[in-house]
Image (cartoon, rainbow, N blue to C red):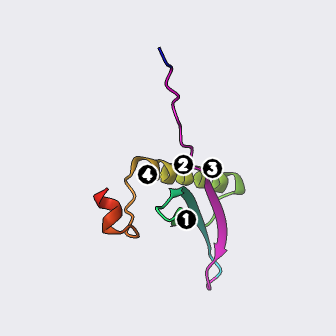
């Protein structure tokens, strides 16, 4: 009897702080979601705005980690829409 090797694909989000023209902070969450048919990396991005501007650094870090984990989960489960794929890729 052969044992099957289970492949677990682990997504990893990166968080980048960006500033708007008015000085407010916005965070860009990027998740690499595998490769496309041509061998290029598929990246999904989402902007996240803090719900309260007066959050402490610890509260902000915790909220960002939750938002990134939720976004990773959406990508992994296929809930995030991907408008960049061709019809041929969907037809396979």
Q: Nearer the viewer, mark 3 or mark 1?
A: 1
Is residue 51 shown to the viewer in this render?
Answer: no
Q: In this view, does 38 lie above or below 73?
A: below
Q: How far apart are marks 4 and 1 (CA)?
A: 21 Å
Up the image or down, 58 lies above or below 38; here it is above
Residue located beneath label 2 in the image: 69
- The residue depicted at 65 percent of the width and 73 percent of the height is 18
The earlier-in-sequence mark between 4 and 1 is 1
The magenta region covers 3-22
Q: How crowded is mark 4: few (under 14 residues within 10 Å), some or many (20 or more)?
A: few
In the rendered image, the residue lying farthest to the top is 1
Q: Earlier in the sequence, mark 3 or mark 1?
A: 1
Dominant secondary structure (helix, strand or loop) of the stretch shown in magenta: loop
Q: Tell me if label 4 and label 3 are in contact, CB under 8 Å.
A: no
Question: Could you say whether the residue bearing mark 3 is in a helix, strand or loop?
Answer: helix
Residue situated furthest bottom in the rendering: 21
Q: Which mark is residue 40?
A: 1
> Which disc, if any, is residue 74?
4
Pinpoint residue 73: horizontal percent, then vertical percent. Answer: 47, 47
Name above or below for residue 48 compared with residue 19: above
**Separation of marks 3 and 2 at Cα, in angstroms:** 11 Å
Mark 2 Cα shell of 10 Å, populated few (<14), some (14-19), many (≥20): some
Q: Is residue 75 magenta?
A: no
Instruction: Give the residue number, with chain letter if any, for mark 3.
Output: 62
Residues 17 and 77: in front is 77
Q: In which quarter of the image is residue 60?
A: bottom right
For the point 54% across and 48% down, the residue is 69
Q: How far apart are marks 2 and 4 (CA)?
A: 9 Å
Q: Earlier in the sequence, mark 2 or mark 4?
A: 2
Nearer the observer: mark 2 or 1; the answer is 1
Q: Nearer the viewer, residue 43 or 25?
A: 43
Mark 4 secondary-structure assignment: helix
């Amino acid at each position: 009897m052969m044992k099957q090797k289970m492949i677990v694909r682990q997504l990893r989000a990166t968080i980048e702080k960006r500033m708007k023209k008015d000085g407010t902070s916005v965070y860009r969450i990027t998740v690499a979601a595998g490769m496309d048919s041509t061998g290029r990396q598929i990246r999904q991005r989402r902007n996240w705005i803090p719900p309260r501007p007066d959050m402490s650094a610890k509260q902000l870090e915790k909220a960002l980690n939750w938002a990134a984990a939720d976004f990773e989960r959406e990508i992994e489960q296929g809930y995030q829409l991907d408008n960049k794929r061709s019809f041929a890729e969907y037809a396979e």
